[in-house]
Amino acid sequence: MAASGVMQMAIDRYLLEQHRQGKHPPTLRLYTWQPAAISLGYHQPEYPDFWHDLTWQGQPLDIIRRPTGGRAVLHQGDLTYAIVTSIAPGKRLEVYQYICQFLITGWRSLGVDLNYGTATKEYIQQQNCFATATGADLVTTAGNKVIGSAQLRRGKALLQHGSMILNTDKQLYRQVFKTDLAQNLCEVIPQSSNPLTTDPQSELTAKIVERLVQAASAIFKIDLVKQPLSTKEWQDIANTRVE
C-alpha cells in the first residue's frame, strides 16, 4: 500500500492504540511512501535546513516525524514493515531480534543472508539511521546496513517498524545525507538462484512482500488474513492523524 508519510504514521499509531485497547488483533503491514519522504525519529531534535529544499521527481520531499525512535530515514525505493502486537516485558534487544527473525527468514528465501549489527556509541551522533548498525538492525554479509528498525511501546502493546532499502536512488541518498549508499537489497539477490532480478521492480517488490508474509506466518506460527481497513477505521484515522 502506498500513501503519504503522514497517513502511514497515522495508521500505525491508530492500530497500536486499537490493539492496546483490545479492539484490533496483531497486525503486519508492508507499505511504501508516496510522495518520497524523510522520516525523523521521535526524539531526533534537529535536522539540516536544506532538507526542506530537496525534491524527488518534481515533488518536495516530505519531512515526517515517526512515533518510534531512531534516526532519519529516506523513504524512496524502500519498503517499510510495521508489526503491532502484544509482548511480555523483556529486554528490548531480545524483542527486536525475536521480531526481526521473520525478516532474516524471508530474505534468506530470496538468497540474501542477513545478520544483526553491532551497537556503537557513534549511532547517537548520526543524523542518518543507516550510517551505523545497532544490534536491532540487519546487515549484509559485506557488513552494510540494509534494514533499520525502531519500536514504540504502550504497556504490553508494541509497534515495531523499519525500513528495507530495496532500490533507493543513490544520487538522492547522497543529496540527503552527504555520503554514499553502500548497498541496495535488490543488488544482492543472486541472479543465479533467483530469476526475479530480471523482473520489473514492481513484480520483484510483490515477490519480496509474498516471501516476508510467508516467513512471518511460519516464524510467529499464525495464519495471516489480508484485510483492508474499514470505512469507519479510515474515518477515525483521518480525524486523529497528526501532521
Image (cartoon, helix red, strand yellow):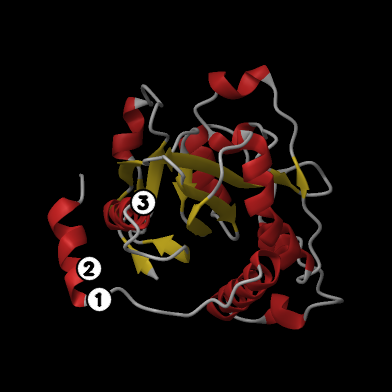
Q: Which residue is mark 1?
A: 230
Distance CA(mark 1)–CA(mark 3): 19 Å
Residue in front for this viewpoint, 110 or 63: 110
Q: Is disc 2 placed on a helix, strand or loop?
A: helix
Distance CA(mark 3)–CA(mark 2): 16 Å
| Left or right placement of residue 241 versus residue 21 in this view | left
Outermost residue on the right side: it is 192
Q: Is residue 72 visible?
A: yes
Quarter of the picture containing the N terminus is bottom left
Query: Could you classify mark 1 by the number of other residues whose Cα lies within 10 Å: few (under 14), some (14-19), or many (20 or more)?
Result: few
Amino acid type, residue under disc 3 in the picture: Arg
Dot 1 and dot 2 residues touching (CB under 8 Å): yes
Q: Nearer the viewer, mark 3 or mark 2?
A: 3
Q: Which residue is mark 2?
A: 233
Q: Which tag, 1 or 3, sits closer to the chain's start?
A: 3
Q: Which residue is mark 3?
A: 20
Amino acid type, residue under disc 1 in the picture: Ser
Quarter of the picture containing the C terminus is top left
Query: Could you classify mark 2 by the number of other residues whose Cα lies within 10 Å: few (under 14), some (14-19), or many (20 or more)?
Result: some
Q: Residue at x 37, y 22 (%)?
A: 45
